[in-house]
Amino acid sequence: AQSVTQLDSHVSVSEGTPVLLRCNYSSSYSPSLFWYVQHPNKGLQLLLKYTSAATLVKGINGFEAEFKKSETSFHLTKPSAHMSDAAEYFCVVSGRTGGSYIPTFGRGTSLIVHP
Amino acid sequence: KAGVTQTPRYLIKTRGQQVTLSCSPISGHRSVSWYQQTPGQGLQFLFEYFSETQRNKGNFPGRFSGRQFSNSRSEMNVSTLELGDSALYLCASSLGPGTANTGELFFGEGSRLTVL
């Protein structure tokens, strides 16, 4: 069984300040972890992924995340927010089942960026 | 390389009708999965197809079905529509089973279904 909890439904920051979106996961095995971003009326786009290599993962648009097994966390950060970062962010845990990956999505965190 | 294409993008149906949604995966991707996104339930896995076979299914009633064709294109069908079926239906493609598959999904922009 697997589950994922995004600890904040909304995060509000000012442009140029750091971003922290929190994600905790639960999995019976070594999972793959992902962060996706969804802009209004669009599909989901992959930001970054952890697949048991380096624990600090760098993604697109300056985002990065650190896998902490002891804390079962995979928080997403960015040093300086940009207006274009305003979107919905989803943390996803994915485990292999019979050769396929079945994803479980968090409920999403809406990032609001103020000028 | 073309992305995942979903058609139609928007559609309106009435209760009791049925609907068919289409998804064309990225060239070379053999696995297609479907998701329902609603404000109340979030993103939920519907089913996954690989090589024209349903490999996994989420917890949805039998009114939700799908299929995959030999060219990896997929369709999903919802029969006897209910108001609660109003949602954004997202399709995603991936490489499919194998060591090269890390679970990364490539999503289309979705089909927004409104049931009146």
Image (cartoon, rainbow, N blue to C red):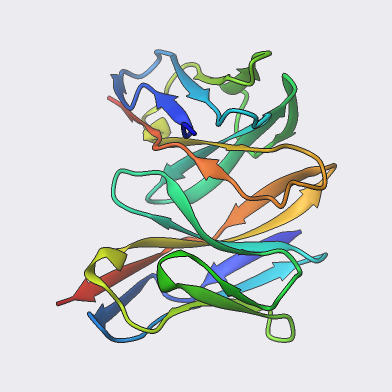
Side of B27 relative to B79 (left or right): right
Side of A21 relative to A101 (left or right): left
Residue shown at 55% from the left, 29% from the top: B25
Residue shown at 50% from the left, 16% from the top: B79
Q: Is residue A10 above or below residue A43?
A: below
Quarter of the image where the N terminus of chain A is located: bottom right
Side of B42 relative to B14 (left or right): right
On the question of residue A1 being in view, the answer is yes
Quarter of the image where the C terminus of chain A is located: bottom left
On the question of residue B41 being in view, the answer is no
Q: Position of residue B12 (x, y in %)?
A: 28, 22
Residue shown at 73% from the left, 37% from the top: B96
Q: Position of residue B88 (x, y in %)?
A: 39, 37
Q: Is residue A21 above or below residue A99?
A: below
Q: Position of residue A38 (x, y in %)?
A: 38, 53
Q: Position of residue A80 (x, y in %)?
A: 33, 82
| Residue A108 occupies quadrant | bottom left
